[in-house]
Amino acid sequence: MKSTENELFAGKVAFVTGAGTGIGRATALAFSSRGASVVIADVAEETLQETAQLIEKQGGHSLAVVCDVTQEKQIKMALDKAIDTFGRLDYAFNNAGVEQPKAPLADIEVAEWDRIINTDLRSMFLCMKHEIPLLLSQGGGAIVNTSSGAGVKGIEGQTAYAAAKHGIIGLTKSAALDYAAQNIRINAVCPGFIDTPMMDRFSGGTEEGRHEVISQEPIGRAGKPEEIADAVIWLCSEASSFIVGHALVVDGGQTV
Ligand code: NAD
């Protein structure tokens, strides 16, 4: 990496949820390698600590906070710790989420619907509710929320997940309008099939399942978590300074 890229986010602080594995981990590492201090949050402590070690190994600074994004108090506490430790917040990547086991709508229990909507959609509201005042207090910043290909098209057997991911785009666009004039840019990223533990669970972890998933990708392969991280970094950087309320599809052509 060129030294100017190393310094892209020097002195800045990023908050990343779902940072224990997959897209969140890759993005936390990407923020760190560009000079940001990173507050990494996840409900799973063991993998979160592994991410912290990876950041340390590449010479970065992180604060690991165990945080369940369905719990408002835990989000507030994580952000309070971020300010206590690093003194500021510049970027937030609201990314934690869970997949929905495939099922037609009438077979989804109400508790399952609530679990997915709470984890994948309500959490984005809660995170932004507590991040935005911190960004406002220092004159601005950038937020990226993780939606999905399921946020831009319907998917059979995925009503709860697709409702949450479509909801994230409406939430993102409207929040972006609320704060555009106050120098906070809020955007979403919509990944296609990305090689992460979530994809392993979704595909059943078999060669056959993997092949079936990849066959839906015109590019002929699954995406890498780093390819989503690059999009998030761009959406947080000055290179995208006129991009507001956009849902950026990064999906190898899956939803084209
Ligand atoms: P992943 O399962 O590897 O990572 C998700 C992380 O979120 C995990 O570390 C998990 O512990 C954490 N998490 C789950 N529930 C949480 C909670 N309540 N509080 C805090 N953390 C919690 O999955 P991933 O593929 O990296 O997914 C990241 C995001 O990308 C999700 O929002 C997912 O819906 C979205 N996405 C993934 C794909 C894909 O193909 N992998 C495609 C489109 C969208």
Image: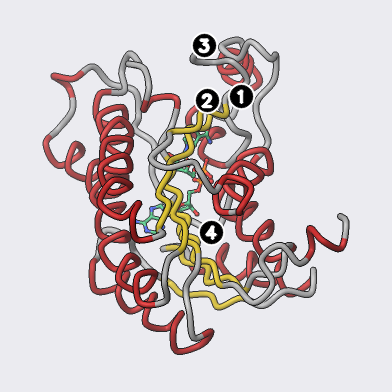
- The x, y position of residue 240, in whole percent, is 57, 45
Question: Earlier along the polypeptide chain: callout 4 or callout 1?
Answer: 4
Contact (Cβ within 8 Å) of mark 1 with mark 2 = yes
From this viewpoint, which residue is outermost toward the bottom? 84
Question: Nearest the camera: 43 or 73?
Answer: 73
51 sits to left or right of 81: right
- Label 2: state its secondary structure: helix
Q: Is mark 4 within 8 Å of ligand 1?
A: yes
Q: Amino acid under label 1?
A: Thr
15 sits to left or right of 98: right
- The x, y position of residue 69, in whole percent, is 32, 60
Task: Say which quarter of the image contains residue 73.
Answer: bottom left
221 sits to left or right of 235: right
Mark pair 2, 4: CA separation: 21 Å
From this viewpoint, which residue is outermost toward the front? 181
Q: Amino acid under label 2?
A: Ser
Question: Earlier along the polypeptide chain: callout 2 or callout 4?
Answer: 4
Question: Earlier along the polypeptide chain: callout 1 or callout 3?
Answer: 1
- The x, y position of residue 103, in whole percent, is 28, 21
Question: Earlier along the polypeptide chain: callout 2 or callout 3?
Answer: 2
Of circles 2 and 3, the one toward us is 3
- Count neighbours of disc 4 (C-alpha within 10 A) and say few if under 14, some if 14 to 19, many if 20 or more: many
Of circles 1 and 3, the one toward us is 3
- Count neighbours of disc 3 (C-alpha within 10 A) and say few if under 14, some if 14 to 19, many if 20 or more: few
Identify the residue position indicated by label 1 in the image: 206
Q: Residue at x 44, y 54 (%)?
A: 143
Q: Amino acid under label 3?
A: Val
Mark pair 2, 3: CA separation: 21 Å
The colour scheme used here is: secondary structure
